[in-house]
Image (cartoon, rainbow, N blue to C red):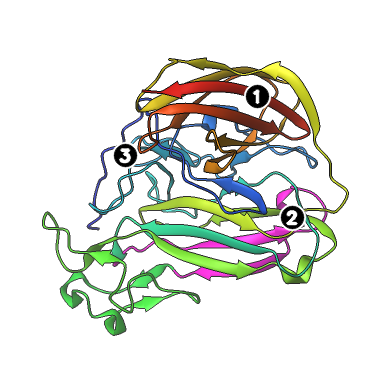
């Protein structure tokens, strides 16, 4: 069995936040390791991310057992944080790792789910996974709708190289079969191309008027490693949702700053968190979406590289809690 070991970096990493689109229902780019805030078991009505290792099997390379954070993916061009999940155990078996979103209210047929994924190797031992939806709760058995399937490797000799037709795979999308989103691994061979993070999307129109949970289930049998990144759900927000302005300020450090600021504030309840930066004309010059965050004291890093020198206003929204501050770029 020829599988490629990936060195896992578990040190803290302060990433750059991606600019988000308007009408963002959920966004997580995994650039910073927030997995400590994820629940490790689901209770049915959880309001935050759940990272649940159902199989409980020991990894062959001593990797963490559930979805875990890494500062980069596998290909040289994928240089930001993501989540990994392993299916290579001491004894061959099926993985069963669930990454479950907080509940998401789908108002109408405009909602779309976007994400990226990449296998550690393809075609041989390419990992598969499923994207599932529950319209009731976040218990595993409630995820009865399958909206995407990535195929996994079943059989084929390494001597077949990158001839995908010479291998057999399970049903679903085979990463790299069109010879795109792959990178040759000089340390290996053509039967073990590196997967490049590939974007996918799925309409959520069929869930209009419902509140749903979405799960990424890594369920490969005896393969290797899968990466997941940039989960984004866009759509229309519920009408009548109003924000309550709060005069409480966000503490900003350093101030003045040149390349990045750190925010400190007290979050009243678990909620989706976003921030906007305004210039002196009142124009929005940067929008940052952090995703779901728990209540309590929060510390956030925001990249301000590229902003011209001058005074700026900052607005942080955490659910219906809105906080303000100002800072100077030097």
Indicate which disc, 1 or 2, sits on the residue closer to the N terminus: 2
Image coordinates for residue 86, horizontal then vertical, percent: 41, 47
Quadrant of the drawing holding the N terminus? bottom left
* For discs 1 and 2, the disc positioned in front in the rendered view: 1
> Between residues 173 and 79, which one lies in front from this camera angle?
79
- Dot 1, crowdedness within 10 Å: few (<14), some or many (≥20)? some
Query: Does the residue at mark 1 contact the one at mark 2 (Cβ under 8 Å)?
Result: no
Q: Which residue is drawn at 70% across and 67% down?
A: 204
Q: Report the side of 180 relative to 325 (left or right).
A: left
Q: Where's residue 104, x and y in %?
A: 74, 51
Q: Name the residue under label 2.
A: 141
User: Which residue does the numbered mark 3 point to in the structure image?
Assistant: 61
Image-based side of 138 in relation to 167, left or right: right
Q: Which residue lies furthest to the front in this view?
A: 281
* Image quarter of residue 133: bottom right
Q: Position of residue 325 (x, y in %)?
A: 60, 21
Mark 1 lies on a secondary structure that is: strand
Q: Magenta residues, as a range? A: 123-151
Image point 58% across, 47% down: which residue?
Answer: 27
Within-10-Å neighbours for mark 3: few <14, some 14–19, many 20+ = some
Q: Which residue is drawn at 20% across and 70% down?
A: 158
Q: Where is residue 210 in the image (x, y as percent from the top left)?
A: 83, 59
Q: On the image, numbered disc 1 is attached to which residue?
A: 324
């Amino acid at each position: 069995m020829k599988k490629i070991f990936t060195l896992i970096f578990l040190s803290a990493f302060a990433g750059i936040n991606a600019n988000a689109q308007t009408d963002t229902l959920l966004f997580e780019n995994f650039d910073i390791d927030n997995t400590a805030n994820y629940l490790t078991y689901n209770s049915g009505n959880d309001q935050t991310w759940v990272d649940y290792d159902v199989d409980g099997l020991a990894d062959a390379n001593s990797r963490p057992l559930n979805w875990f954070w890494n500062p980069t993916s596998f290909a040289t061009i994928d240089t930001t944080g993501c989540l990994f999940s392993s299916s290579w155990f001491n004894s061959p078996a099926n993985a069963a790792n669930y990454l479950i979103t907080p509940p998401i209210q789908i108002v109408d047929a405009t909602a779309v789910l976007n994400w990226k994924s990449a296998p550690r190797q393809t075609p041989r031992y390419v990992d598969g996974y499923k994207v599932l939806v529950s319209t009731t709760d976040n218990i595993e058995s409630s995820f009865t709708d399958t909206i995407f399937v990535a195929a996994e490797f079943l059989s084929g000799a390494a001597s077949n190289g990158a001839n995908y037709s010479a291998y057999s795979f399970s049903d679903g999308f085979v990463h790299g079969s069109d010879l795109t989103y792959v990178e040759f691994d000089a340390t290996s061979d053509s039967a073990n191309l590196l997967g490049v993070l590939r974007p996918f999307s799925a309409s959520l129109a069929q869930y209009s008027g419902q509140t749903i949970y979405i799960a990424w289930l890594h369920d490969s049998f005896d393969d290797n490693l899968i990466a997941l990144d940039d989960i984004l759900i866009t759509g229309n927000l519920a009408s009548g949702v109003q924000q309550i302005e709060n005069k409480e300020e966000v503490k900003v450090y350093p101030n003045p700053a040149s390349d990045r600021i750190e925010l400190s504030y007290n979050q009243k309840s678990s909620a989706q968190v976003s921030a906007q930066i305004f210039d002196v004309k009142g124009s929005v010059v940067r929008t940052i979406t952090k995703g779901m965050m728990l209540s309590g004291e929060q510390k956030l890093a925001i990249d301000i590289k590229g902003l011209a020198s001058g005074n700026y206003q900052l607005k942080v929204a955490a659910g219906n809690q809105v906080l303000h501050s100002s800072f100077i770029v030097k």
